[in-house]
Structure formats: C-alpha cells, structure tokens
Image (spheres, helix red, strand yellow):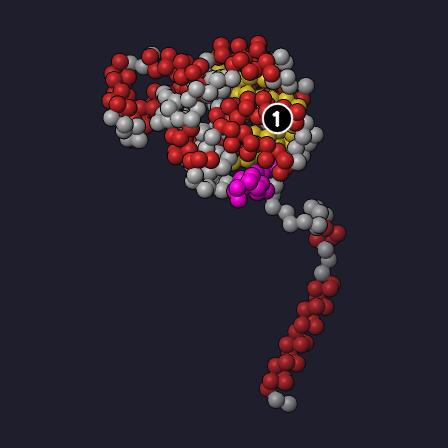
Amino acid sequence: MTNSVKRRGFISLCCVAAAAVYGRRPTYAAEDGVQLPSADTVHVGGSKRIEIGGGHWVWTKKIGNGHIKVLLLHGGPGADHRYFEAFEDFFPINGIEFYYYDQLDSTNSDKPDDPALWTIQRYTDEVEAVRQGLGLDNFYLLGHSWGGVLAIEYALKYQQHLKGLVISNMAASTESFLRHVSKVRSRFPADVRAELDVYENTNKTDDPIYQKLLFERLYKIFICRLDPWPDPVLRSLGGLNQHVYKVLQGRSEFEATGRMNGWNRWDDLPKIKVRTLTMGARYDEMDPEDMRRMAELLPHGEAWISETGSHLAMYDDQENYFKVLLNFLKA
C-alpha cells in the first residue's frame, strides 16, 4: 500500500468518525433548554438598511416588541441616534417597540456628503421612506430638537400614517428659537459676550476657546445639566457632522444662517389633527411658553414642561420626562 493510499484511507476514516460524533451530539435547544430565534432568516439584532432613493440608504434598528410603535428622530442637525439610548431602559419594559434611525450623512448611514441633499423637505421625505421601509403605520413619531422640525413637517404632509406625535424641545419656528437663545445670551457676563463677539465677528467659531465658552456658558446649563454628561450624549454629540450642522443651522446655536433660516410653522399647527405632546424645560434653549402655546394651537395638543431639566430633560429630569412620555404613549 502506497503512502498516498494510506493518507486517503486515514482521512476517510476521520471523516466517518467525525460524522458519527456529530450525529450523536444533542441539539442545544432540546438538551440544555437554550432558546433560539426562528431559523428562517439571518438575525442581525434588529438593524436594517432602508433605501431612500437616489442610490442612498439610512440605518435603522428595532428595539423591543409591542403593539405601540415609536420612530425616533434625532437632533443636531447632524447628530445621531445614540443619545436616545436611555429609551432602552424605559420603552421595552413597558411593551413599547421603538426604532432608531440615523439620518442621511449621520453616523451609521450613507454619507454622500452632498449639501444639495440637506434640505428640510428632502429629510421629511426621507422619514416617509423609512416608515415605508419599516412597514410602520398607526405609529408614534417622536422628534427631538432638529428632529422636532422634521416631526412637524412630517405630520403636516403624512399624518394619515400617525397615531400620535411628540415634539420634544423644539419650537414651531427658527425665529422663536433664536429669540429665546438670544435672551439666554444676554444674561451672560459682559466680558463673556464680548469675547463671543470677537470670535464670531472674525469667523473663528471653530476655535477651541470659542467652543469652550459655548460649553461652559450654554451647553452645561441649557443642553444638559448633569456633570459629567452621560456617555450616550458624549458619543452622539462628539460624532456630530459639522458640515451638515453648518449648512442647515449655521456656525453655532446663536444663529440660523443656514437653510433653517425662516422656517416657521406656527400658522400651520392647527392642521395637525393627531394627538400631540409638546415637551419643554425651564432651562431649555426653547422658550417653555412657546411649547405651551404650541399645545394650545394643536387641536389635540398637550404640553409638559420640566421644572428642573434642560434641552436634554430625558437625562437631567429623566424620571419625570419618561413618566409623562410613557403615559401619553399608553393612553
């Protein structure tokens, strides 16, 4: 017998032995009580890419299972879903199914880096493409900050698909936002205002000193009042797409020189017929009175204002924020 024949015989014997051992192995589900999801698909933890037209796609992720379904619209513009991660501790245990989604050119989504695509109208239609791709109907839409702009726009164009709407920390016009944040700025010490003016007038708002002034005087008080900031907030805002932000908003929170300039939906709020909750905070960049006025103009509106929280009351007045939100969703 040649060596090659011996090797072939040995390999064949090993294969037969391995097959016999494999055939005797118990299935984990039957033997150890392990539960497995259905075997008719490849499981990806709820993540799904949605085609939105033009050859582009956005990332979404489903969390939990339930009859109540909520799609979250993040702020920025140019931030991402990550600062919503606190919702994972509140929604699933209440039987609420919700969906993250990163808008075009945000963290997990396609990044064509084409400013022509960064318009309020196109982002609104993107939300509708996401709804269709996820197969949602009779669902709740929650928009926070810039996401609140998109939530209002979506409700005005596509409200037949909505069960309800949540507008969190966003006024009904850019002018309203600027008026309030200018009032906030007017309370800064004179030397701080003068220093901000210098950087703005010389177009140096990217300078680390200017950014530190913003953080110390505005963000730590009116964005999130916790110290330190929660990890999801740090990761989300740390990954902000500055290009998208500048095209839509402007150089900083103190101006709206981008495409959001002139946005105003105060007169159109009565056209939104679905149940709507507006959520604001005493220390928000948005005027709490504007949030109350919005609820009054909405045919089925109600308002909640945090007495201790800020723009991210979902963190710095968390228990109250989620109590109100959950009761609204489950009503």
Residue assigned mark 1: 158
Q: Which residue is depicted at the point 32% across and 14% down?
A: 188
Q: Which residue is depicted at the point 52% across and 23% down?
A: 148
The answer to whether residue 314 shows anywhere in this view is: no
Q: For the C terminus, give its image quadrant.
A: top right
**Secondary element at tag 1:** helix
Residue 261 percent across, percent down from the top left = 42, 22
Residue 209 percent across, percent down from the top left = 27, 28
Query: Which one is in front, 170 or 128?
Result: 128
Q: Is residue 310 left or right of residue 96?
A: left
Q: Would you place residue 193 above or below residue 16 in this image? A: above
Instruction: For label 1, count other residues whose C-alpha is less than 10 Å away and answer few (under 14), some (14-19) or many (20+).
Output: some
Name, please, the residue furthest toward the bottom. 1
Q: Which residue is depicted at the point 43% across and 19% down?
A: 262
Look at the image and give the residue range highlighted in magenta.
48-63
The answer to whether residue 272 shows anywhere in this view is: yes
Q: For the N terminus, give its image quadrant.
A: bottom right
Q: Amino acid at mark 1?
A: Tyr
Q: Is residue 231 magenta?
A: no
Q: Which residue is depicted at the point 59% across and 24% down?
A: 157
Q: Is residue 228 left or right of residue 154?
A: left
Query: Which one is in front, 59 or 314?
Result: 59
Residue 103 percent across, percent down from the top left = 51, 35
Q: Would you place residue 20 above or below residue 113 in this image? A: below
